[in-house]
Image: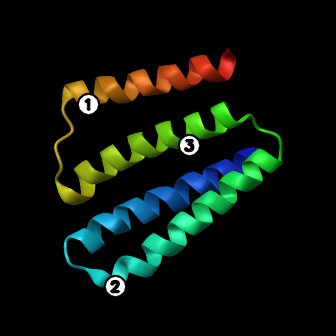
């Protein structure tokens, strides 16, 4: 169950962050998604921890996957730059999380 909760935490956090970008550009109607998404993301993360996943692993995966998804979504949805160096950075984050997970 902890992996399901972690996946939901990531989805809620990414949705909230993308909606925050919309709010920042003047689309205030996305504010409930921002607030609800962050509350739901942290609620799911607490369930992950309650299910026994170590904090370092849960938080590492949550942030790494979130950063990668936000970077790609920003590129696809908002035309933000996603250069080679950013892709290498995302790969480094992923490797780092794997090292923490297996360490």
Q: Name the residue nearer the viewer: 56 or 80.
A: 56
How many residues crowd around disc 2 within 10 Å: few (fewer than 14), some, or many (20 or more)? few
Q: Which residue is mark 2?
A: 29
How many residues crowd around disc 1 within 10 Å: few (fewer than 14), some, or many (20 or more)? few
SS type, badge 1: helix
**Residue at x 26%, y 30% (from the top left corner):** 86
Q: Which residue is mark 1?
A: 86
Residue 99 seen in render = yes
Above-or-below relation of 30 to 95: below
Horizontal side of residue 23 vs 61, given as left or right: left
Q: Which residue is mark 3?
A: 62
Residue 1 seen in render = no
Q: Name the residue nearer the viewer: 47 or 88.
A: 47
Horizontal side of residue 14 vs 18, given as left or right: right
Q: Name the residue nearer the viewer: 10 or 43.
A: 43
Above-or-below relation of 22 to 65: below
The mark nearer the N terminus, 1 or 3, is 3
The mark nearer the N terminus, 2 or 1, is 2
Q: Are marks 2 and 1 in contact (CB under 8 Å)?
A: no
Residue 93 coordinates in the image, percent (x, y): 44, 26
Above-or-below relation of 39 to 5: below
SS type, badge 2: helix
């Amino acid at each position: 169950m902890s992996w399901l909760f972690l996946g939901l935490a990531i989805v809620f956090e990414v949705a909230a962050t993308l909606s925050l970008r919309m709010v920042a550009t003047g689309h205030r109607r996305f504010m409930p998604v921002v607030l609800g998404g962050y509350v739901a993301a942290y609620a799911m993360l607490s369930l992950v921890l309650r299910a026994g996943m170590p904090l370092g692993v849960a938080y590492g995966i949550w942030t790494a996957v979130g950063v990668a998804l936000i970077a790609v979504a920003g590129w696809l949805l908002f035309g933000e730059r996603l250069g080679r160096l950013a892709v290498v950075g995302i790969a480094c984050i992923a490797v780092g999380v794997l090292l923490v997970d297996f360490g």
